[in-house]
Amino acid sequence: MLKGMGDLMKQFGKMQGKMEEMQKELENQRLEGSAGGGMVKVIANGKGEILEMNINPEVVNPNEIEILQDLAMAAVNQARQKAEELMKENLSKITGGLKIPGLPF
């Protein structure tokens, strides 16, 4: 029983190291969300942090600011969704698809 527990702890240590490595890799990923046919673009990293937003001046109309706000929100949500999918995919590779309590996905 003790040997099994030791093996389990070693496996956990390896998994923890891989997860830390994955976090670093995700931070360096760049994912783009866009809306309005590319008129609004958002870049997020693999952790879902928004890094930049580009808005084509053609969509800036003071009389239609609600449309611009909707486009910006759609682009942000798309970029964050891509980041979440990337995290899930990478985490699944590390855990072998096991659902481990305390992990985000």
Image (cartoon, rainbow, N blue to C red):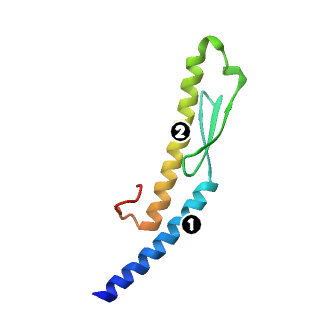
**Residue drawn at 27 percent across, 87 percent down:** 1
Residue 104 on image: x %, y %:
42, 55
- Callout 2 crowding tier (Cα within 10 Å): few <14, some 14–19, many ≥20: many
Q: Which mark is residue 32?
A: none
Residue 98 falls in image quadrant: bottom left
Apparent side of residue 91 relative to residue 67 in the rendered image (left or right): left
Q: In the image as oriented, which residue stretches furthest toward the right?
A: 57
Apparent side of residue 15 relative to residue 67 in the rendered image (left or right): left
Residue 94 on image: x %, y %:
46, 67
Mark 1 element type: helix
Tell which of 81 and 3 is nearer to you. Answer: 3
Tell which of 42 and 35 is nearer to you. Answer: 42
Q: Tell me the residue that label 1 is attached to.
A: 21
**Residue drawn at 37 percent across, 79 percent down:** 8
Location of the C terminus (image quadrant)? bottom left
Three-letter amino acid code at the position of disc 1: Glu
Three-letter amino acid code at the position of disc 2: Gln
Apparent side of residue 16 relative to residue 97 in the rendered image (left or right): right
Q: Is residue 87 above or below residue 68?
A: below
The tag earlier along the polypeptide, 1 or 2, is 1
Residue 56 on image: x %, y %:
70, 27
> Which tag is nearer the camera, tag 1 or tag 2?
1
Q: CA distance from mark 1 to mark 2?
A: 25 Å
Apparent side of residue 72 relative to residue 95 in the rendered image (left or right): right
Residue 79 on image: x %, y %:
56, 41
Tell which of 82 and 45 is nearer to you. Answer: 45
Q: Is residue 43 above or below residue 10?
A: above
Determine contact: label 1, label 2, CB under 8 Å: no
Mark 2 element type: helix
Residue 33 falls in image quadrant: top right
Q: Tell me the residue that label 2 is attached to.
A: 78
